[in-house]
Image (cartoon, rainbow, N blue to C red):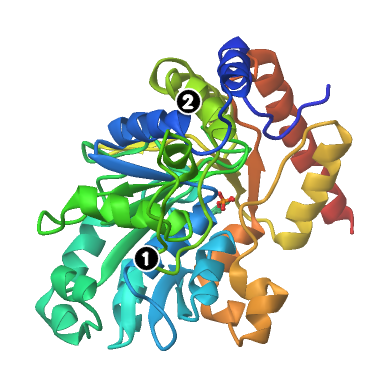
Amino acid sequence: MKIPFSPPYVDDDVLNEVQDTLKSGWITTGPKVKALEIETAQLASVSYALCVNSATSGLMLAMRWFGIGPGDEVIVPAYTYCATALAVIHLGATPIMVDIQDDFTLDVKDVEKKISSKTKAIIPVDIAGWPADYDALNQLVKREDILAMFDAQNDIQRVLGRLLILSDAAHSLGAIYKGLPTGRLADLTVFSFHAVKNITTAEGGCIAINLPNNFDHLDVYSVMRLMTLNGQTKDAFTKTKNGGWKYDIILAGFKMNMPDVCAAIGLAQIRKYNSIILPQRKKVANFYTQLFSKYNWAKLPMLLTNGIESSYHIFPLRIIGINENIRDAIIEDISRKGVAVNVHFIPMPMLTLFKSMSYDINDYPISYLNYSCEISLPIYPQLTIKQVEFIVNSIVESYEKIRKLEIKI
Ligand SMILES: Cc1ncc(COP(=O)(O)O)c(C=O)c1O
Protein backbone atom coordinates (compact mmCIF):
# COMPACT_ATOMS: atom_id res chain seq x y z
CA MET A 1 0.00 0.00 0.00
CA LYS A 2 1.42 3.41 -0.99
CA ILE A 3 0.56 6.16 1.48
CA PRO A 4 1.74 9.71 0.74
CA PHE A 5 2.76 11.99 3.59
CA SER A 6 0.55 15.01 3.01
CA PRO A 7 -1.37 15.35 -0.27
CA PRO A 8 -3.43 18.55 -0.69
CA TYR A 9 -7.19 18.46 -0.10
CA VAL A 10 -8.65 19.23 -3.54
CA ASP A 11 -12.36 18.61 -4.04
CA ASP A 12 -14.92 19.97 -6.54
CA ASP A 13 -15.44 23.12 -4.45
CA VAL A 14 -11.73 23.91 -4.72
CA LEU A 15 -11.75 23.26 -8.47
CA ASN A 16 -14.86 25.42 -8.96
CA GLU A 17 -13.49 28.29 -6.89
CA VAL A 18 -10.20 28.29 -8.82
CA GLN A 19 -12.03 28.05 -12.14
CA ASP A 20 -14.25 30.94 -11.11
CA THR A 21 -11.15 33.06 -10.48
CA LEU A 22 -9.50 32.06 -13.74
CA LYS A 23 -12.64 32.96 -15.69
CA SER A 24 -13.24 36.20 -13.80
CA GLY A 25 -10.61 38.23 -15.63
CA TRP A 26 -8.74 38.96 -12.36
CA ILE A 27 -6.21 36.49 -10.99
CA THR A 28 -3.91 38.43 -8.66
CA THR A 29 -4.72 40.17 -5.34
CA GLY A 30 -8.39 41.13 -5.30
CA PRO A 31 -11.78 39.93 -4.04
CA LYS A 32 -10.80 36.30 -3.30
CA VAL A 33 -7.92 37.41 -1.10
CA LYS A 34 -10.25 39.77 0.74
CA ALA A 35 -12.76 36.94 1.24
CA LEU A 36 -10.03 34.62 2.56
CA GLU A 37 -8.88 37.34 4.95
CA ILE A 38 -12.42 37.68 6.31
CA GLU A 39 -12.77 33.89 6.76
CA THR A 40 -9.36 33.65 8.47
CA ALA A 41 -10.10 36.60 10.75
CA GLN A 42 -13.36 34.90 11.78
CA LEU A 43 -11.62 31.62 12.51
CA ALA A 44 -8.96 33.44 14.54
CA SER A 45 -11.59 35.62 16.22
CA VAL A 46 -9.85 38.90 15.29
CA SER A 47 -11.09 41.92 13.34
CA TYR A 48 -8.35 41.98 10.73
CA ALA A 49 -6.15 39.41 9.02
CA LEU A 50 -3.81 40.10 6.13
CA CYS A 51 -2.90 37.54 3.47
CA VAL A 52 0.69 37.31 2.26
CA ASN A 53 2.58 35.00 -0.09
CA SER A 54 4.05 32.79 2.68
CA ALA A 55 4.35 32.54 6.45
CA THR A 56 8.04 33.38 6.09
CA SER A 57 7.01 36.66 4.43
CA GLY A 58 4.42 37.21 7.15
CA LEU A 59 7.03 36.89 9.89
CA MET A 60 9.38 39.27 8.06
CA LEU A 61 6.61 41.76 7.41
CA ALA A 62 5.41 41.74 11.03
CA MET A 63 8.94 42.31 12.34
CA ARG A 64 9.65 45.04 9.75
CA TRP A 65 6.39 46.78 10.75
CA PHE A 66 7.61 46.69 14.39
CA GLY A 67 10.90 48.25 13.25
CA ILE A 68 13.15 45.28 14.01
CA GLY A 69 16.53 45.45 12.32
CA PRO A 70 20.31 45.31 12.80
CA GLY A 71 21.39 45.31 16.44
CA ASP A 72 18.09 43.80 17.65
CA GLU A 73 17.57 40.33 19.06
CA VAL A 74 14.56 38.08 18.63
CA ILE A 75 14.02 34.95 20.72
CA VAL A 76 13.09 31.78 18.84
CA PRO A 77 12.99 28.09 19.80
CA ALA A 78 15.87 25.95 18.52
CA TYR A 79 13.29 23.35 17.53
CA THR A 80 11.39 24.79 14.56
CA TYR A 81 11.55 25.03 10.81
CA CYS A 82 14.42 27.28 9.71
CA ALA A 83 12.00 29.96 8.40
CA THR A 84 11.35 31.18 11.96
CA ALA A 85 14.99 32.17 12.39
CA LEU A 86 15.67 33.07 8.76
CA ALA A 87 12.95 35.73 8.88
CA VAL A 88 14.91 37.35 11.74
CA ILE A 89 18.21 37.04 9.87
CA HIS A 90 16.75 38.56 6.68
CA LEU A 91 15.96 41.72 8.64
CA GLY A 92 19.54 41.97 9.87
CA ALA A 93 18.57 41.06 13.44
CA THR A 94 19.94 38.17 15.51
CA PRO A 95 17.92 35.08 16.44
CA ILE A 96 18.56 34.03 20.04
CA MET A 97 17.66 30.38 20.39
CA VAL A 98 16.05 28.78 23.43
CA ASP A 99 15.44 25.13 24.22
CA ILE A 100 12.00 23.52 24.22
CA GLN A 101 9.91 21.63 26.76
CA ASP A 102 8.85 18.02 26.46
CA ASP A 103 5.73 19.11 24.47
CA PHE A 104 7.96 20.62 21.71
CA THR A 105 7.08 24.28 22.50
CA LEU A 106 9.59 26.85 23.68
CA ASP A 107 10.73 26.78 27.32
CA VAL A 108 9.59 30.08 28.84
CA LYS A 109 12.14 29.78 31.67
CA ASP A 110 14.91 29.70 29.06
CA VAL A 111 13.26 32.69 27.31
CA GLU A 112 13.42 34.63 30.55
CA LYS A 113 17.16 33.93 30.90
CA LYS A 114 17.89 35.13 27.38
CA ILE A 115 16.01 38.43 27.33
CA SER A 116 18.37 41.41 27.11
CA SER A 117 18.00 45.14 26.42
CA LYS A 118 18.48 44.26 22.73
CA THR A 119 15.47 41.91 22.65
CA LYS A 120 12.53 43.25 20.66
CA ALA A 121 10.33 40.21 20.12
CA ILE A 122 9.68 36.60 21.09
CA ILE A 123 8.48 34.10 18.49
CA PRO A 124 6.74 31.11 20.07
CA VAL A 125 6.09 28.29 17.61
CA ASP A 126 3.01 26.07 17.92
CA ILE A 127 4.81 22.94 16.79
CA ALA A 128 2.57 20.29 15.22
CA GLY A 129 -0.44 22.49 15.99
CA TRP A 130 0.03 22.41 19.79
CA PRO A 131 -0.04 25.96 21.24
CA ALA A 132 2.95 27.22 23.20
CA ASP A 133 2.62 28.37 26.83
CA TYR A 134 0.99 31.74 26.01
CA ASP A 135 -0.14 32.43 29.59
CA ALA A 136 3.45 32.28 30.81
CA LEU A 137 4.71 34.34 27.86
CA ASN A 138 2.08 37.05 28.21
CA GLN A 139 2.82 37.31 31.94
CA LEU A 140 6.56 37.40 31.32
CA VAL A 141 6.53 40.33 28.85
CA LYS A 142 4.44 42.38 31.30
CA ARG A 143 6.65 41.73 34.32
CA GLU A 144 8.18 44.93 35.73
CA ASP A 145 11.83 43.96 35.38
CA ILE A 146 11.26 42.78 31.79
CA LEU A 147 9.33 45.98 30.93
CA ALA A 148 12.18 48.06 32.38
CA MET A 149 14.66 46.31 30.09
CA PHE A 150 12.66 47.08 26.91
CA ASP A 151 14.43 49.78 24.92
CA ALA A 152 11.84 51.24 22.48
CA GLN A 153 13.44 52.67 19.33
CA ASN A 154 10.43 53.99 17.40
CA ASP A 155 6.83 55.16 17.87
CA ILE A 156 5.28 51.71 17.34
CA GLN A 157 7.59 50.17 19.92
CA ARG A 158 6.82 53.04 22.30
CA VAL A 159 3.06 52.52 21.92
CA LEU A 160 3.41 48.79 22.68
CA GLY A 161 5.91 49.56 25.42
CA ARG A 162 7.10 45.96 25.70
CA LEU A 163 8.39 42.96 23.81
CA LEU A 164 6.26 41.92 20.84
CA ILE A 165 4.85 38.40 20.98
CA LEU A 166 4.79 37.23 17.38
CA SER A 167 3.33 33.76 17.13
CA ASP A 168 4.64 31.41 14.45
CA ALA A 169 1.34 29.59 14.02
CA ALA A 170 2.35 28.03 10.69
CA HIS A 171 0.89 24.76 12.02
CA SER A 172 -1.86 25.85 14.35
CA LEU A 173 -4.78 27.47 12.54
CA GLY A 174 -7.87 26.27 14.43
CA ALA A 175 -6.07 25.24 17.62
CA ILE A 176 -7.61 26.36 20.91
CA TYR A 177 -5.84 27.59 24.05
CA LYS A 178 -8.00 27.96 27.15
CA GLY A 179 -11.08 28.99 25.19
CA LEU A 180 -9.32 31.22 22.67
CA PRO A 181 -8.37 30.32 19.09
CA THR A 182 -4.85 30.84 17.78
CA GLY A 183 -4.80 34.40 16.52
CA ARG A 184 -5.96 35.69 19.90
CA LEU A 185 -3.00 34.43 21.93
CA ALA A 186 -0.24 36.77 20.75
CA ASP A 187 0.04 40.36 19.45
CA LEU A 188 0.49 39.16 15.88
CA THR A 189 0.00 35.60 14.66
CA VAL A 190 1.29 34.22 11.39
CA PHE A 191 -0.43 31.23 9.79
CA SER A 192 1.00 29.28 6.85
CA PHE A 193 -1.06 28.22 3.85
CA HIS A 194 1.83 26.24 2.34
CA ALA A 195 0.88 23.14 0.30
CA VAL A 196 1.09 20.71 3.25
CA LYS A 197 -0.75 22.85 5.79
CA ASN A 198 -4.28 22.25 7.14
CA ILE A 199 -5.55 24.99 4.80
CA THR A 200 -3.52 25.68 1.69
CA THR A 201 -3.26 28.28 -1.04
CA ALA A 202 -0.33 26.30 -2.59
CA GLU A 203 1.98 28.93 -1.09
CA GLY A 204 0.71 31.61 1.25
CA GLY A 205 0.26 32.88 4.75
CA CYS A 206 -1.85 35.20 6.83
CA ILE A 207 -1.18 37.62 9.70
CA ALA A 208 -3.88 37.92 12.37
CA ILE A 209 -3.81 41.27 14.19
CA ASN A 210 -4.51 41.13 17.94
CA LEU A 211 -2.52 44.08 19.27
CA PRO A 212 -3.63 45.89 22.43
CA ASN A 213 -6.51 48.33 22.01
CA ASN A 214 -4.28 51.42 21.93
CA PHE A 215 -3.47 50.37 18.35
CA ASP A 216 -5.95 51.13 15.55
CA HIS A 217 -6.21 47.64 14.03
CA LEU A 218 -7.59 48.85 10.69
CA ASP A 219 -4.70 51.26 10.44
CA VAL A 220 -2.16 48.50 11.22
CA TYR A 221 -3.82 46.26 8.61
CA SER A 222 -3.72 49.05 6.01
CA VAL A 223 -0.04 49.88 6.64
CA MET A 224 0.94 46.20 6.53
CA ARG A 225 -1.08 45.71 3.35
CA LEU A 226 0.79 48.60 1.75
CA MET A 227 4.01 46.90 2.82
CA THR A 228 3.01 43.78 0.85
CA LEU A 229 2.58 45.86 -2.33
CA ASN A 230 5.80 47.85 -2.67
CA GLY A 231 4.38 50.66 -0.52
CA GLN A 232 2.08 51.58 -3.40
CA THR A 233 -1.01 53.61 -2.47
CA LYS A 234 -3.29 51.83 -4.95
CA ASP A 235 -3.19 48.11 -5.58
CA ALA A 236 -3.40 46.78 -9.15
CA PHE A 237 -7.08 45.89 -8.73
CA THR A 238 -8.04 49.45 -7.71
CA LYS A 239 -5.89 50.88 -10.51
CA THR A 240 -7.93 48.96 -13.11
CA LYS A 241 -11.04 50.92 -12.14
CA ASN A 242 -11.92 53.82 -14.49
CA GLY A 243 -9.73 56.84 -13.88
CA GLY A 244 -7.82 55.11 -11.08
CA TRP A 245 -4.39 54.97 -12.68
CA LYS A 246 -2.55 57.49 -10.46
CA TYR A 247 -0.59 56.13 -7.52
CA ASP A 248 2.25 57.02 -5.20
CA ILE A 249 4.94 54.99 -3.40
CA ILE A 250 5.02 56.11 0.21
CA LEU A 251 7.32 53.58 1.85
CA ALA A 252 9.90 50.96 0.87
CA GLY A 253 7.52 48.00 0.86
CA PHE A 254 8.12 44.38 0.00
CA LYS A 255 6.31 42.42 -2.74
CA MET A 256 4.56 39.82 -0.64
CA ASN A 257 0.92 39.89 -1.75
CA MET A 258 -1.13 36.75 -2.31
CA PRO A 259 -2.76 36.26 -5.73
CA ASP A 260 -6.53 35.57 -5.99
CA VAL A 261 -5.95 32.34 -7.91
CA CYS A 262 -4.12 30.98 -4.83
CA ALA A 263 -6.61 32.45 -2.36
CA ALA A 264 -9.40 30.60 -4.22
CA ILE A 265 -7.99 27.22 -3.11
CA GLY A 266 -7.84 28.25 0.52
CA LEU A 267 -11.22 29.93 0.40
CA ALA A 268 -12.97 26.72 -0.70
CA GLN A 269 -11.13 24.79 2.04
CA ILE A 270 -11.54 27.23 4.92
CA ARG A 271 -15.33 27.31 4.42
CA LYS A 272 -15.42 23.64 5.42
CA TYR A 273 -12.54 23.70 7.90
CA ASN A 274 -14.55 23.47 11.10
CA SER A 275 -17.23 21.19 9.67
CA ILE A 276 -15.12 18.67 7.70
CA ILE A 277 -11.36 19.18 7.41
CA LEU A 278 -10.44 19.71 11.08
CA PRO A 279 -12.79 17.01 12.47
CA GLN A 280 -11.38 14.50 9.96
CA ARG A 281 -7.82 15.27 11.00
CA LYS A 282 -8.87 14.88 14.63
CA LYS A 283 -10.44 11.51 13.84
CA VAL A 284 -7.19 10.26 12.33
CA ALA A 285 -5.16 11.55 15.31
CA ASN A 286 -7.53 9.89 17.78
CA PHE A 287 -7.38 6.61 15.88
CA TYR A 288 -3.55 6.65 15.99
CA THR A 289 -3.76 7.35 19.72
CA GLN A 290 -6.10 4.44 20.24
CA LEU A 291 -4.02 1.99 18.18
CA PHE A 292 -0.68 2.96 19.74
CA SER A 293 -1.96 3.04 23.31
CA LYS A 294 -1.10 -0.64 23.91
CA TYR A 295 2.58 -0.13 23.06
CA ASN A 296 4.53 1.22 25.99
CA TRP A 297 7.38 2.36 23.72
CA ALA A 298 5.06 4.76 21.86
CA LYS A 299 4.95 8.27 23.30
CA LEU A 300 1.93 10.06 21.88
CA PRO A 301 1.65 13.79 21.20
CA MET A 302 -0.41 16.25 23.23
CA LEU A 303 -3.74 16.69 21.46
CA LEU A 304 -6.37 17.77 23.97
CA THR A 305 -5.83 18.55 27.63
CA ASN A 306 -6.59 21.29 30.19
CA GLY A 307 -8.60 23.36 27.71
CA ILE A 308 -5.86 23.25 25.08
CA GLU A 309 -6.59 21.54 21.77
CA SER A 310 -4.25 20.94 18.86
CA SER A 311 -5.01 21.74 15.23
CA TYR A 312 -3.88 18.18 14.46
CA HIS A 313 -1.42 19.39 11.85
CA ILE A 314 1.42 16.93 12.51
CA PHE A 315 1.29 13.65 14.43
CA PRO A 316 4.73 13.55 16.09
CA LEU A 317 5.12 10.03 17.44
CA ARG A 318 8.10 9.56 19.75
CA ILE A 319 9.64 6.16 20.37
CA ILE A 320 10.94 5.79 23.89
CA GLY A 321 14.43 4.38 24.35
CA ILE A 322 15.79 4.75 20.82
CA ASN A 323 18.55 6.95 19.44
CA GLU A 324 18.86 8.86 16.18
CA ASN A 325 20.41 5.92 14.26
CA ILE A 326 17.70 3.47 15.31
CA ARG A 327 15.03 6.06 14.44
CA ASP A 328 16.57 6.47 10.98
CA ALA A 329 16.68 2.67 10.48
CA ILE A 330 13.00 2.40 11.47
CA ILE A 331 12.07 5.16 9.01
CA GLU A 332 13.99 3.40 6.21
CA ASP A 333 12.16 0.17 6.92
CA ILE A 334 8.73 1.87 7.05
CA SER A 335 9.46 3.64 3.76
CA ARG A 336 10.13 0.29 2.08
CA LYS A 337 6.54 -0.66 2.95
CA GLY A 338 5.28 2.36 0.99
CA VAL A 339 4.45 4.61 3.96
CA ALA A 340 5.87 8.12 3.68
CA VAL A 341 6.84 9.53 7.08
CA ASN A 342 8.90 12.52 8.10
CA VAL A 343 10.81 14.14 10.96
CA HIS A 344 9.69 17.50 12.35
CA PHE A 345 12.23 19.00 12.75
CA ILE A 346 16.00 18.77 12.55
CA PRO A 347 16.80 21.33 15.29
CA MET A 348 18.29 24.43 13.71
CA PRO A 349 21.64 24.20 15.58
CA MET A 350 22.29 20.93 13.69
CA LEU A 351 22.01 22.62 10.28
CA THR A 352 25.11 23.89 8.46
CA LEU A 353 24.10 27.56 8.34
CA PHE A 354 23.37 27.78 12.04
CA LYS A 355 26.42 25.73 13.02
CA SER A 356 28.52 28.21 11.04
CA MET A 357 26.92 30.97 13.14
CA SER A 358 28.15 29.19 16.32
CA TYR A 359 24.84 27.72 17.50
CA ASP A 360 25.61 24.39 19.18
CA ILE A 361 23.07 21.56 19.61
CA ASN A 362 24.65 20.68 22.99
CA ASP A 363 23.08 23.86 24.34
CA TYR A 364 19.58 22.55 23.47
CA PRO A 365 19.35 19.06 25.02
CA ILE A 366 15.55 18.66 24.93
CA SER A 367 15.48 19.74 21.28
CA TYR A 368 17.99 17.00 20.49
CA LEU A 369 16.21 14.40 22.61
CA ASN A 370 12.83 15.04 20.96
CA TYR A 371 14.36 15.10 17.49
CA SER A 372 16.29 11.86 17.95
CA CYS A 373 13.22 9.71 18.65
CA GLU A 374 10.55 11.52 16.58
CA ILE A 375 8.69 10.22 13.52
CA SER A 376 5.89 12.31 11.99
CA LEU A 377 3.07 10.15 10.65
CA PRO A 378 0.73 10.94 7.75
CA ILE A 379 -2.32 12.88 8.92
CA TYR A 380 -4.93 14.34 6.56
CA PRO A 381 -8.69 14.16 5.96
CA GLN A 382 -8.48 11.74 3.04
CA LEU A 383 -6.79 8.98 5.12
CA THR A 384 -9.00 5.93 5.60
CA ILE A 385 -9.25 3.73 8.70
CA LYS A 386 -7.60 0.91 6.72
CA GLN A 387 -4.67 3.14 5.80
CA VAL A 388 -4.20 4.25 9.41
CA GLU A 389 -4.21 0.61 10.52
CA PHE A 390 -1.65 -0.20 7.82
CA ILE A 391 0.59 2.69 8.96
CA VAL A 392 0.44 1.61 12.61
CA ASN A 393 1.10 -2.05 11.74
CA SER A 394 4.04 -1.01 9.57
CA ILE A 395 5.55 1.03 12.39
CA VAL A 396 5.07 -1.73 14.97
CA GLU A 397 6.65 -4.31 12.61
CA SER A 398 9.56 -2.05 11.74
CA TYR A 399 10.15 -1.13 15.37
CA GLU A 400 10.18 -4.78 16.47
CA LYS A 401 12.41 -5.83 13.56
CA ILE A 402 15.00 -3.10 14.10
CA ARG A 403 15.08 -3.64 17.86
CA LYS A 404 15.71 -7.39 17.36
CA LEU A 405 18.53 -6.65 14.89
CA GLU A 406 19.99 -4.22 17.37
CA ILE A 407 20.06 -6.89 20.11
CA LYS A 408 21.87 -9.33 17.76
CA ILE A 409 24.49 -6.70 16.87
C1 LIG B 1 7.11 26.21 12.05
C2 LIG B 1 7.12 26.83 10.68
N1 LIG B 1 7.30 28.15 10.58
C3 LIG B 1 7.30 28.76 9.37
C4 LIG B 1 7.15 28.05 8.21
C5 LIG B 1 7.19 28.76 6.90
O1 LIG B 1 5.99 28.68 6.22
P1 LIG B 1 5.91 29.10 4.69
O2 LIG B 1 6.38 27.94 3.89
O3 LIG B 1 4.46 29.40 4.47
O4 LIG B 1 6.79 30.29 4.53
C6 LIG B 1 6.96 26.66 8.27
C7 LIG B 1 6.80 25.88 7.04
O5 LIG B 1 6.71 24.69 7.02
C8 LIG B 1 6.96 26.03 9.54
O6 LIG B 1 6.81 24.71 9.64
The residue indicated by pointer 1 is: 250
Task: Identify the residue at the far front of this view.
Answer: 243
Ligand 1: does it lie within 8 Å of the C-beta at label 2? no
| Quadrant in the picture for the C terminus | bottom right
**Relative side of 341 to 39, left or right:** right
The nearer-to-camera label among 1 and 2 is: 1
The residue indicated by pointer 2 is: 267
Q: Is residue 232 visible?
A: yes
| Quadrant in the picture for the N terminus | top right
**Relative side of 387 to 101, left or right:** right
Q: Residue at x 22, y 85 (%)?
A: 151
Splitting the image into 4 quarters, where does residue 357 fall? Answer: bottom right
**Relative side of 180 to 249, left or right:** left
Q: Residue at x 42, y 80 (%)?
A: 69
The percent position of residue 271, horizontal first and vertical second, equals 42, 20
The residue tagged with tag 2: helix, strand or loop? helix
